[in-house]
Amino acid sequence: MSEQNTPVGINRENVTRWFEEHTEITGPLDFGLIAGGRSNMTFTVTDAADRKFVLRRPPMGPLLPSAHDVAREHRLMHALQDSDVPVPRLVGLCQDEAVNERDFYVMHYLDGVVVRDAEIGATIPVEIRTRMCHELINTLCTLHRVDIDEVGLGNLAKRTGYIERQIKRWSGQWEQSKTRELPVIDRVADYLRANIPTDAPTTIAHGDYRLSNCMMDPAGPVAGVLDWELCTLGDPMADLAGLLGYWHDPENVEEEKGDAEITAAPGWLSQQEMAGLYADQMGVSLEQVDYYRGWASWRLACISEGVYARYLNGQQGEQDEELDLDEYKQGVESRAERAAAILGV
C-alpha cells in the first residue's frame, strides 16, 4: 500500500514508529480500514512478514463525553486474557495523542468469520448455525460467571445501580447527539426510570454482546468476543436482552436488517430458545426479561442516533460499505417505537 493510500485516521509515520519502539513488530506496515464499524474505527495492520494485526481508535472530530474509550476496551480484554472468555491476544496500548491524534490499541488478528449480514449468514451450514447459537449462549454464561475481583475488575464501575446509570447516560447522549425530536424516547425513558428491577446480581456486562460482535470459528465456537467499549459491571440480564434485541424470529418480518435478518433463516434458534438456554445454564428467571428487552431497544435507538450524527458529520472515515442514511435514521425511530411496544407505553 502506498503512502498516499494510507486510510484516514492513521498517521503512517508516527504509528509505524510507535510499533517499532513499543512492540516486536517492525515496518514497513500496511494499513487498511475495516468497513462496518459503527463506533470506533478499526484497521488491519500487516507487517513485512505478512502477519496481520488489528488497530482500534476513536472516530475523528468532536466526541461525546465518555464515549469511544479504547483504553477501557484494552483494559477489559487484558483482564480476561487468562480467563475462559475468548478474547484476542493484545499487542499494546498507546495513550500518547501526539502519535495518532487519539488513543489506540493493537491486538492480534483473529481467523474466523464475523456473521454481520444475511449474505455471510447464508454461507454457514444449517447445522453449524444451531451450534453457533449454543456457543453464543455458552460464552455469554462464561463471561457472567467470571469473578470480577479475581481478574482485577472489581473497581471498574459501581456494583449497584447499573440500569439507573444506563438510563442517565444514554438520555444524556441522546440530548447531545439528537438530530430531531422524538417524544417516544423520553416517554420510554420515564417508564424505565419508574420501573427499575431490584436485587439484580452484579457481573461483567459486555454491553453490546451479539452475533456480529463475535469472531466465530467456522465450526461453530466463539473464537473471540469483540467490541468491549460499553463493558462495565452490571446486570447480566441486560446482556441477554441486548442479544435478543438483535435476534430475529422468522414470523417477525417487520424487524430491522442486520443480525436480526440473519437469524430468520433455518437453523438459528428463536429468541425464546436462546433465552431458555441462558436461563437453564445460569439458573435464573426470565420474569423480567421484557423490561430489559425494552431498555435494550431504547438504548440502541439512542446509540444509533449518535452513529447517524457521526456519519452525517463525516467522522467515520471513508467506509467501503454504503450506508443508507435515510434508512438508518428511520431505524432509530423504529427501535424507539419497538421499545415502547415491548413495555406497553
Image (tube, rainbow, N blue to C red):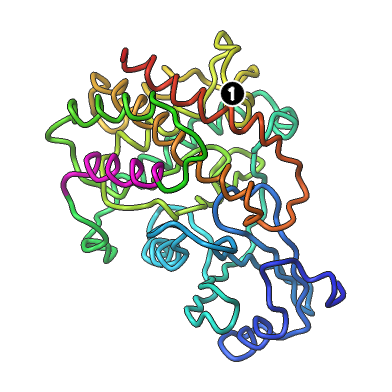
Residue 82 figure quarter: bottom left
Residue 293 figure quarter: top left
| Placement of the N terminus among the 4 image quadrants | bottom right
Magenta span: 160-175
Question: Residue 270 vs residue 321: left or right?
Answer: left
Residue 303 to residue 181: above or below: below
* Residue at image location 83% in from the left, 77% down from the top: 3
* Residue at image location 63% in from the left, 48% down from the top: 311
Q: Amino acid at mark 1?
A: Glu
* Residue at image location 23% in from the left, 28% down from the top: 284
Residue 165 lies within the magenta run = yes
From the image, give the main secondary structure of the stretch colored magenta.
Answer: helix
Relative depth, front residue between 255 and 101: 101
What residue would you read off at disc 1?
256
| Rendered location of residue 240, percent (x, y) | 37, 33
* Residue at image location 53% in from the left, 66% down from the top: 89
Relative depth, front residue between 135 and 13: 13
Residue 73 lies within the magenta run = no
Question: Residue 307 vs residue 112: left or right?
Answer: left
| Rendered location of residue 334, percent (x, y) | 51, 22
| Placement of the C terminus among the 4 image quadrants | top left
Which residue sits furthest left?
199
Question: Residue 233 vs residue 217: left or right?
Answer: left
Residue 99 figure quarter: bottom right
